Amino acid sequence: MAQPAIQQGQLFAKNIMRLIANKPMKKFKYNDKGSMATIGRNKAVVDMGSLKFSGFLAWFVWMFIHLMALVGFRNRVVVFFNWTYNYINFDKAARLIIRPFDKLIK
């Protein structure tokens, strides 16, 4: 749901500027850029119009697009190294927060 919000925010800012300049506002028209999702280690799905694929290539495309969406070169590098470290070490430490289970003894 991020894409519609981003596009609406951009149009909203432009429409405010148009309103200040006494110009007519433009209607919102959503531009569907497609969908992507990771579904496991080295696996993802990509659906961008007529282009649909899955597997390692889709996972790599997902990773690249999400890195490029980050603001600033330093943030991209830090996230990339964090992902690389987690990939190499199979690190899943921050994914679940659970409490200890006390087994009932009878």
Image: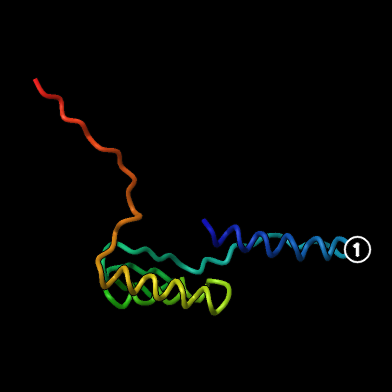
Q: Give the colour scheme shown.
A: rainbow
Vertically, is 7 above or below 94? below
Vertically, is 30 above or below 53? above
Is 102 in front, or is 49?
A: 102
- Residue at far right of view: 22
- Residue at far top of view: 106
Is 106 in front, or is 55?
A: 106
Vertically, is 103 above or below 54? above
Decide if residue 69 is on the left or right side of residue 15: left
Q: Which residue does the image show at 8% across and 20% down from the upper left?
A: 106
**Percent from the top left, x then y, of residue 80?**
41, 75
What residue is shown with label 1? 22
Task: Sort mark 1 into few (<14), some (14-19) or many (20+) by Cα contacts within 10 Å.
Answer: few
For residue 8, what is the image quadrant? bottom right
**Circle 1: residue type:** Asn
For residue 17, what is the image quadrant? bottom right
**Percent from the top left, x then y, of residue 34?**
46, 67
Q: Which residue does the image show at 26% across and 73% down from the upper left?
A: 88
For residue 58, what is the image quadrant? bottom left
Under circle 1, the secondary element is loop
**Percent from the top left, x then y, of residue 74?**
53, 77
Q: How many marks?
A: 1
**Percent from the top left, x then y, of residue 56?**
27, 75
Is 90 in front, or is 21?
A: 90
Decide if residue 11 is on the left or right side of residue 55: right
Decide if residue 92 is on the left or right side of residue 68: left
Q: Which residue does the image show at 57% across and 59% down from the upper left?
A: 4
